[in-house]
Image (cartoon, grey):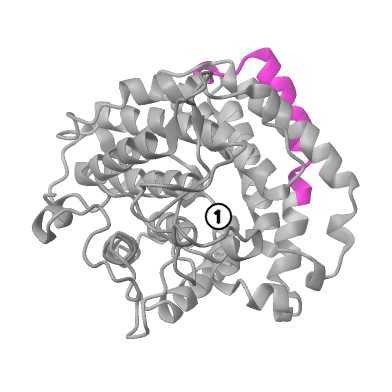
Amino acid sequence: MQDFRIREAIELMAGFAERTGLSSECTQQRYLWTDAFAVCNFLGLSRATGEKHYTALALRLVDRVHHTLGRHRDDDSRTGWISGLSEREGEGHPTRGGLRIGKEFPERRPNQAFDERLEWDRDGQYFHYLTKWMNALDQVARSTGRPQFNIWARELAETAHHAFTYVPLAGGPRRMYWKMSIDLKRPLVSSMGQHDPLDGYITYVQLRSTAARLPRAGGDPKLNDETRQIQAMIVTDELGTADPLGIGGLLMDAYRVEQLLRQGGMMDPHLLETLLATSIAGLKYYAASGELQLSAEHRLAFRELGLAIGLHAVRLMGEAANRDPTQSPMTDGVRLRLRELMQYVPVGERIESFWRDPAHRRSLTWSEHRDINEVMLATSLVPEGFLVLPPTDLSRPHRGGQ
């Protein structure tokens, strides 16, 4: 990896850590999506530089998230862990009640009218943010060999699954709520996220795969029923999207599927080709839309950078297939799709180059979302921390305790 990419990522992550109170005395500013990417970035920087203090920052961030977003807000009449557990039990199981999003305003009260614009800025819980945090915890477990982080991820998965999914009273297939209250007792947005079941299925398989190979990570929750239920909720014909962050998410998921299959994970082998084919359709539309010709003031960096990260996943898949073709889980159909996707890798490079330009980062759309923009730009610069599922430490016990 080029040194300049690592240097830029270090600078971006150092600024984020300072501003949000991770490495300073500033007030804690925790936001679950951004923090999930940040944890993985610190792990990636640790692997890229050999400097262990980045792993220490990842561990500190996990602790800060649990003690901020796993507890009630300062402006809430409720106190303590959102799970309702005692202080001692909550310390041992910080994800048992889920984790707040970290939005600016309190959640909508039961007697408040729904306002779509305001709802975006109100707190609560999102399933797709929780799956990002499950992945971050699992990446810590895989990188350090410490099973507790995988256990916390599985406890979060079990809690989220049973709170967000339901069987309609009128019958029909199981569905999911998109947004839940902080205490997970009532839906705030009842519609179902387009990719939530997909993210959940792949994440559950990942957590189970890690638990099976990491010493002392066995036991409950096993997520067997949850995995089966959420897999049945995936409607492959409805996964298509022309949104850059959505396309990027499909490509990130595809690479996780490829790695899990390569590592012996028990999952649907046909899903990989489906995700790649769906991504191609969205990319064709997006590339022709002209959005990348707009000025910085009319673009959302974090959504575009999601696509850039996804296209790094395409590059890494191609490199893995070329490096060890005999161990690749790729069918001829997957290889054909991957070759077509490789033509779009320069789109990701173009997005990354645009947002690396300091002049474009002076726009209001950048500054309004500075933390998430800078963290995701750092992910694009050093993508392995977020994208790669390290298998190497899973065969030996961790000497540092739990």
Residue most toward the front?
111
275 vs 225, left or right, is: right
Does the magenta run of residues contain 339?
yes
**Magenta residues?**
326-347
311 vs 159, left or right, is: right
Quadrant of the image occupied by residue 251: top right
- For label 1, the SS is loop
- The residue that appears at 87% across and 64% down in the rendered structure is 294
Amino acid bearing label 1: Met
User: 73 or 333: nearer the eye?
Assistant: 73
Considering only vertical position in the picture, is 35 above or below 171?
Answer: below
Name the image quarter holding the N terminus.
bottom right
Mark 1 highlights which residue? Answer: 1
Which x, y percent locates residue 69?
34, 62
User: 210 or 197: nearer the eye?
Assistant: 197
Residue most toward the bottom?
25
